[in-house]
Image: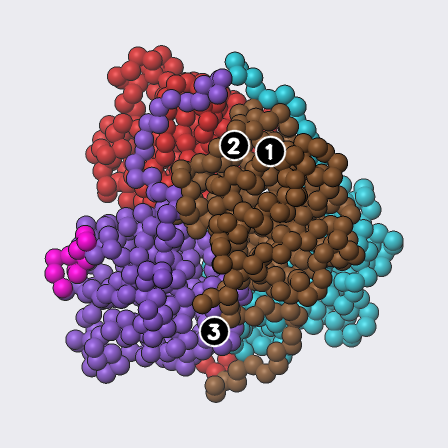
Chain colours: A brown, B red, C purple, D cyan
């Protein structure tokens, strides 16, 4: 029987304490909802841990936990700057070495994501609770398995608009339409070193996005998609002088 | 002084003869409007020829004209199937050898485009004259030079919706928003052999799209972008046995 | 228990009848070696069928078999032109609808591959039995799982050299070095419609390439990688008029 | 008459002072050779400034010079760590805002390059003066204009080997072959924000690489290719709240 994928759900966990609307939607925190949703979708296939910004000096991310994580999800918003640079660098480095990373919503400005993209990750935004449609533009992509239609509709969402300042994605899976007139590349995949990064836009804190089965289906698919494959060619963690060349008679 | 880029505007030229609305917008044919627009934008930098489906056995595309064309633009819709396979193959082959190709609007189903893409190029559509916004998602891209904003707005347009069945573009420049709820990858670039292909969505026959300066600016930029560079490494027009390897003592 | 992946190994099966050197390496045909190798690597995870050029009017590829195939492998060389256009089109269309396709060695000139690439697929070649090293340039890629090093070495191989006339791959996994002075993109992945295509270079008929465990490991990984995911968003097999847009009050 | 492209050649300029072999090849510094070579190739089309690590607190890169630079070339090796983080960040940010950047040889470890890639940029290396062939794998690419063949041969070069830990390039132009058995992606292009980055491998300090006309031809082409286009859509240097959406009646 295959080992479960070890997922660490990292969460800023601040809005829930200061904004009653958020606490109403996520009484146990957004991380609890994400954990429950992934477990509902993936069952025994997943073993989910959570970690939060204020847990300890490492924001809950010990070296041991990082080493034992196959896939990390990351949600942050109001306190990106409080994430210690050293921890952000460790997360980014784990991705290069093979860990999968799923960056959610306002995590577009999270330190590990910016470190991996090499860009500023700017975008436009507006918060009027308008309608959003996430169009799947890559039929057959594993991240879209089990969806009931070729788009996901959210009645009320914060708007994110282009230009989204990220490198051209290796794979573009979803593009969002917003009622107010904008579009956004909402589902993007990049490889960095031996690891895969999946950015998925939905997740504003005042809407029950992570209780939506279609959204959680995409995230569960994403976990599978960015999880490292066992026994792949090792990441080169240095620039070695590799010595002797083939000789002419070889 | 640099030589002008030699552009051949190819046009189906049928709707103008059967639909008075189209004839009213393009009294001399859409090809005449495209020619005039490119000349207005590029002046001496361009030498524009036109060719149409019914001109002769070659649809106006003699071997000599094909050989003398740097960039071809292609608009077709109701008569794709009347383009002879042999001519479509010649156009596609010229692209592989270095000619630039700009495919317009309903040209998504044109034979040369499908031959170069390797896909069926399906999409969704609706014709209610709704509002379209073409968002530029690649700031700084040469194809966007001179635009007055980061989107182009068309008050009335036919809708094209995703999924658009084309290979992942090498460069994605524009994504359209439509009032009725859809999105579309409206500006895409691919390399095929030594040539570049630019697909640009706007151009429905009953709207004066090719009299819009912003649209013609993009097309003029596109001509420059896909035009072949002089003296580049030659396209390999065969699979040669290249004989002697380096010897061990070399 | 998951269903096995249904693989159809398609083989030209001509060299074995005319060249005693090939018959010596592959006494039951190259397709038998490929079938045995995939079964050795994937066990119950795979159900392998074979089909060959001369089997019947459909080259062994009935509509039923095509519909029941998850992944097809394709080896051809001396008789590409004998593959009927209609069958080549059917194979390409099944890829667009989601079937995985693995194209082997001289299959770079196979009709279905050329239809899907949109290019001529030219390359350089030389047959002196020189040394080849396939370097893995994508550490962590699922296609490289289980390899013993970051390159595969073949003591004697036919040389294929750049430029290889294919579209820029969506993913570049292997690049070959040849003793005689050339390089080649030997492992490439593209998406076409809802299906994935994997081109893998090794496989000259006079060398026992498909009895090499490292090579068969890559092919087994490739089968898994290009196999369709169940229940993904359906491929759009037409361009539908999708009718009513969202109304302003929605 | 078009304005010349303003190029700033940045150079570490240390090896020349400590290694007589380097001083013999580049008596006035490698930057002087690069400046002379670009001027020879591009004439009035270019206005070249140089800047070096030890020039002043800003390593010769004042805010004014950065603002006035269209394209920067960067060579560094033994003193990457002495480049102040603040200056590296400014260079990377200028790229995102539209400046072109050409990174040379051992610059694969330069701070601005690593910031823009988001990876560690590791590779393998060996210094035995072996033969290198840079194969052009993108016929027709503007960066290859004017080359005399489809590869450039260097009799003596340091070896760089894969895996090269960079994101999948947007465009792969050159792949190197080395006599000792390795390959390397030697010419790569990425977009980051509104700017383009071109990495070009050749340039070891003890070989007269930048006096080779074929190499300087590539670099001159590269300058043209990554130079910003005038009046393109502006880079979004923030994440603005863009206020009022389209109303339903618009």
Q: Main secondary structure of the magenta part?
A: loop
| Secondary structure beneath label 3 | loop
Q: Which mark is residue D210?
A: none
Q: Residue at x 71, y 62 (%)?
A: A62
Residue mark closest to the camera, 2 vs 1 = 1
Picture coordinates of residue B72 (x, y %)?
A: 39, 36
- C-alpha span from label 2 to label 3: 44 Å
Label 1 crowding class (10 Å Cα cut-off): few <14, some 14-19, many 20+? many
Q: Residue at x 68, y 29 (%)?
A: D241
Circles 2 and 1, Cβ within 8 Å, touching? The answer is: yes
Residue at the disc numbered 1: A207
Picture coordinates of residue C229 (x, y %)?
A: 38, 53
Residue at the disc numbered 2: A154
Q: Are marks 2 and 1 on the same chain?
A: yes
The quadrant the N terminus of chain A occupies is bottom left
Residue mark closest to the camera, 2 vs 3 = 2
Relative to residue B61, is residue A185 drawn left or right? right
Magenta-colored span: C55-64
Relative to residue A11, is residue C183 drawn left or right? left
| Secondary structure beneath label 1 | loop
Residue A28 placement: quadrant: top right
Outermost residue, right side: D57
| Secondary structure beneath label 2 | strand
Label 2 crowding class (10 Å Cα cut-off): few <14, some 14-19, many 20+? many
Seen from the viewer's position, the closer of residues A1 and C71 is: A1
Residue at the disc numbered 3: C147
């Amino acid at each position: 029987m295959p080992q479960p994928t070890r997922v660490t759900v990292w969460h800023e966990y601040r809005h829930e304490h200061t904004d009653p609307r958020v606490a109403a939607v996520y009484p146990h925190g957004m991380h609890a909802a994400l954990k429950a949703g992934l477990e509902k979708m993936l069952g025994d296939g997943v073993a989910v841990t959570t970690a939060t910004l204020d847990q300890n000096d490492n924001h809950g991310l010990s070296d041991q936990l990082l080493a034992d994580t196959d896939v990390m999800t990351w949600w942050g918003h109001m306190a990106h700057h409080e994430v210690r640079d050293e921890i952000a660098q460790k997360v980014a480095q784990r991705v290069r070495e093979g860990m999968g990373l799923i960056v959610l919503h306002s995590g577009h400005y999270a330190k590990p994501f910016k470190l991996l993209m090499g860009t500023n990750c700017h975008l436009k935004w507006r918060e009027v609770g308008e309608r959003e449609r996430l169009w799947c533009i890559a039929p057959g992509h594993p991240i879209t398995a089990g969806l009931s239609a070729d788009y996901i509709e959210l009645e009320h969402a914060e708007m994110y608009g282009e230009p989204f300042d990220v490198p051209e994605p290796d794979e573009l899976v979803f593009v969002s339409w917003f009622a107010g007139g904008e579009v956004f590349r909402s589902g993007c995949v990049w490889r960095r070193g031996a690891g895969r990064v999946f950015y998925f836009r939905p997740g504003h804190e005042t809407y029950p996005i992570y209780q939506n089965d279609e959204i959680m289906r995409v995230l569960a698919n994403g976990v599978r998609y960015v999880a490292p494959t066992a026994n792949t060619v090792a990441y080169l963690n240095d620039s070695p002088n590799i010595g002797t060349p083939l000789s002419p008679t070889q």
